[in-house]
Image: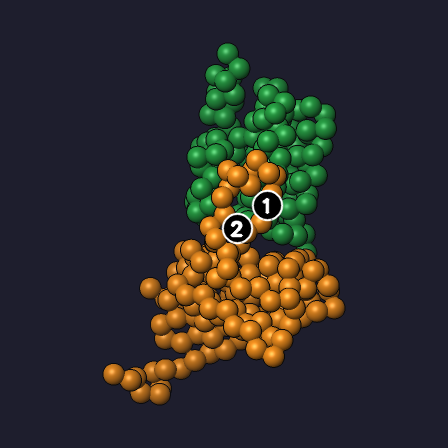
């Protein structure tokens, strides 16, 4: 059954940052504040905060190669039951579906880092979808309220 | 905004790094520098105390992955202590508890080091 419009209120918040890791703390604060204001549990806030941090880090490093002149857009859409985070950039495409679970013992031997962020994002969020259109990369990450 | 800090001290001859604040892709290089400095001085029995660390992202775990082999190859280890549940959860999701000694407190880490030496 479809809820009446009055019960399907959606709130949207947008933040844009320059592609530098020094802005990650500000992104975490933005996400935590709004998720808390919308009544998400501490555990859920902690999961969302880490997933958004990891996704932004990947964009800054891999899509934009630390080019501070580029912009990462973070959009939060809250409705009654869920939060949808929409991250967009115009850098090098990055499809999280193409990543396997990292083999940590093997990576330690080879002194290789990386690949862990995507694994965490998939574990922490309820759904993750990547789209690319007209040079724009869009990552949707959904977290259910319960 | 400065949101991360490391203090270095010794406890019963073991090197201890105390982490404070938030460890992410921006601040991970400070941890890397601290570990590199210890290793370059052949100090390889290292305890990292997470008591005051509120947050960690995978870049922080990456630092431990990059240096653990160096430390173990010179007969030492990096033991991790006093993590809060949120921080431990990140290590756990990536399977670190089977690869690293993650202990409740410094005393347990020292005891483990001493057992391994005897």
Depicted B87 relative to depicted B76: above or below = below
Depicted B36 relative to depicted B92: above or below = above
Depicted A86 relative to depicted B30: above or below = below
Residue B6 in view in this figure:
yes
Q: Colour of chain A?
A: orange
* Chain for numbered disc 2: A
Q: Colour of chain B?
A: green
Q: Relative to A6, is B43 on the left or the right?
A: right
Q: For the point 48% across and 31% down, which residue is it? A: B101
Q: Name the foreground residue: A42 vs B29.
A: B29
Q: Position of residue B39 (x, y in %)?
A: 68, 29
Helix, strand or loop at mark 1 = loop
Q: Which residue is mark 1?
A: A113
Q: Relative to A125, is B59 on the left or the right?
A: right
Q: Give the Cα distance between marks 2 and 1.
A: 8 Å
For residue B45, the mark is none
Q: Residues within 10 Å of mark 1 (few under 14, many from 20)?
A: some
Q: Relative to B80, is B28 on the left or the right?
A: right
Disc 2 vs disc 1: Cβ atoms closer than 8 Å? yes
Q: Residues within 10 Å of mark 2 (few under 14, many from 20)?
A: many
Q: Position of residue A110 (x, y in %)?
A: 60, 38
Q: For the point 64% across and 46% down, which residue is it? A: B28
Q: Which residue is mark 2?
A: A116
- The N terminus of chain B lies in quadrant: bottom right
Q: For the point 65% across and 58% down, which residue is it? A: A61
């Amino acid at each position: 059954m479809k809820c009446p419009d009055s019960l399907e209120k959606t709130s949207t918040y947008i933040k844009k940052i320059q592609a530098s890791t020094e802005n990650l703390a500000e992104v975490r604060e933005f996400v935590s504040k709004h998720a808390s204001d919308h009544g998400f549990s501490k555990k859920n806030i902690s999961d969302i905060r880490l997933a958004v941090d990891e996704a932004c880090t990947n964009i800054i490093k891999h899509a934009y190669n630390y080019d501070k002149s580029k912009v990462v857009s973070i959009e939060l859409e809250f409705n009654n039951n869920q939060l949808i985070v929409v991250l967009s950039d115009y850098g090098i495409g990055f499809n999280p579906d193409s990543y396997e679970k990292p083999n940590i013992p093997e990576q330690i031997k080879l002194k290789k880092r990386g690949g862990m962020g995507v694994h965490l994002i998939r574990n922490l969020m309820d759904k993750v979808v990547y789209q690319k259109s007209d040079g724009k990369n869009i990552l949707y990450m959904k977290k259910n309220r319960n | 905004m400065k949101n991360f800090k490391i203090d270095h001290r010794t406890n019963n001859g073991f090197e201890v790094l105390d982490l404070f604040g938030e460890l992410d892709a921006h601040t991970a290089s400070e941890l890397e520098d601290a570990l590199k400095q210890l290793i370059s001085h052949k100090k390889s029995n290292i305890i990292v105390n997470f008591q005051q660390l509120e947050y960690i992202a995978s870049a922080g775990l990456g630092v431990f992955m990059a240096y653990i082999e160096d430390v173990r190859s010179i007969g030492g280890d990096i033991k991790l202590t006093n993590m809060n549940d949120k921080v431990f959860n990140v290590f756990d999701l990536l399977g670190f508890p089977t690869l690293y000694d993650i202990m409740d407190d410094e005393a347990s880490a020292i005891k483990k080091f001493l057992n391994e030496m005897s």
